[in-house]
Image: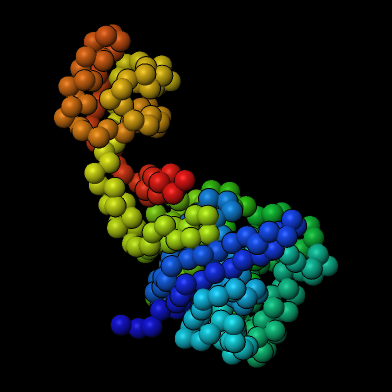
Amino acid sequence: MSAPAIHIEHLVKTYTAGSGQIKRAIGVVPFDIPAGQIVGFLGPNGAGKTTTLHLVLGLTRPTSGSIQVLGHDATKAGNAVRHQIGYLPDVPGFPAWMTAPEFLRFAGSLFGIDKATLDSRVDSLLELAGLTGVNHKIGGFSRGMKQWLGATQALVNAPKLLMLDEPTSALDPLGRKDVLTMIEALRGKATVLFSTHLLDDVERICDSAVVLNQGHVLATGTITQLRSRYDGAQKMRLVTDGGTAHVSALLEDEAWVGDVTIGGDAVVFAADNADRVGKALLGFLASASLTLREYGPALFTLEDAFVLLTEEDR
C-alpha cells in the first residue's frame, strides 16, 4: 500500500481571542488522505476546513500534533515539496491589471517551469477554462471567470496534491459540471482534497470523504461507508393526491413520524420501524381523506448522513 498523500496526527490549533481567552480552532484525531484519490472535505461553516487546509499548506503552524504532506513534515517542508502542491482558495485574489495568459505565466514562473513547457501548459489551461482569446484585464472578469482562472492556476505546476476550497461556489450549473469533470479526470494522476458544502458534488465525484464539525473529525470513509453508517435509520417516500405542503404539515403532528422534508412531488419522512409506520399510515390516509399513489423506502444520501452526523455532535 502506498503512503498517504496527507497524514494528520493529533492536530491541534489554538488562538487567543480578543478577550484574551484561548480558543481551540482545530483538534482532530489521526486521519489519512489516500494518494491518488479525490477526497471530499465536508463541514458546516466554521467547522475548521479552511484552517486545516492552511495548516497542511504550511501557511499557519499547529499548536501541537503533526502533519505529513507527500512524505514530509508540513512545518519544515521546503519549496521542493510546496512546488508539488496546487491550491485554490475560497476567494482567490488576482492582479487586476494582468490578462489571464500573463497571470498564468507569472504563476508558472514562480515554480521555475521552463518557457517552452510553460507556454504549452498555459495554452492548454486557457482552453480548459474557456479563456482562450480572452485578452482583457482580469479586473473586468466575472466571478465565474475568476473562479475558472483560479482553478487553472492551481494546475499550472502539474501538482501531485491539489487542494481546492469551494471550487464550484461561484459557477453556474454548466460551469460547475465542467469543473467537476476536470477534477474527476485527475483521479489516479493526483490527490485531490476538495473542500465544499455542496454534498451532491462530493457524492458525484469523490472516492471518500472526511466530515469535520466544530474543529474535529466526525467520520471518514468511502461515500458508500458514510451512507451505510445509518442503515438502521429508514426514510420513507410518500406520494398522495394531496399537496406536499399540506401532507407534510399533517405528518409532522403524528407521533410515529420523524423529520419530514419535501422532495419534488413526494413527502419524505424518517421512520424507526417501517412495518409499524406502514400500518399507521393507512389510518392516517383514511382520516385525512388522501389517496395513496406511491410509498416505499427513500434512498439514503450523503446529505442525510452529514445531517445526522452533525446533529449527533451538537
In the image, 171 versus 276, the foreground residue is 276
Residue 311 placement: quadrant: top left
> Which quarter of the rendering shows the N terminus?
bottom left
Name the foreground residue: 213 vs 65: 65
* Quarter of the view holding residue 83: bottom right
Q: Quick check: 194 left or right of 141?
A: left
Question: What percent of the width, then of the height, locates residue 179?
Answer: 53, 60
Q: Residue at x 69, y 54 (%)?
A: 143
Query: Residue 144 at x, y = what percent?
Result: 65, 55
Q: Is residue 169 left or right of residue 269?
A: right
- Quick check: can you spot residue 198? yes
Which residue in the rendered view is the most extreme toward the right? 97
Residue 123 showing in the rendered view = no
Residue at x 73%, y 64% (from the top left corner): 93
Q: How is the image coloured?
A: rainbow
- The residue depicted at 45 percent of the width and 61 percent of the height is 217
Q: Residue 250's spot in the image, x, y percent?
A: 37, 17
- Does residue 155 sit above or below 138 in this rendering? below
Residue 172 x/y as whole percent: 58, 48
- Residue 127 occupies quadrant: bottom right
Q: How many discs mark residues in the rendered view? A: 0
Q: Height in image: 40 above or below 302?
A: below
- Residue found at x 47% / y 86%: 71
Nearer to me, 178 or 87: 87
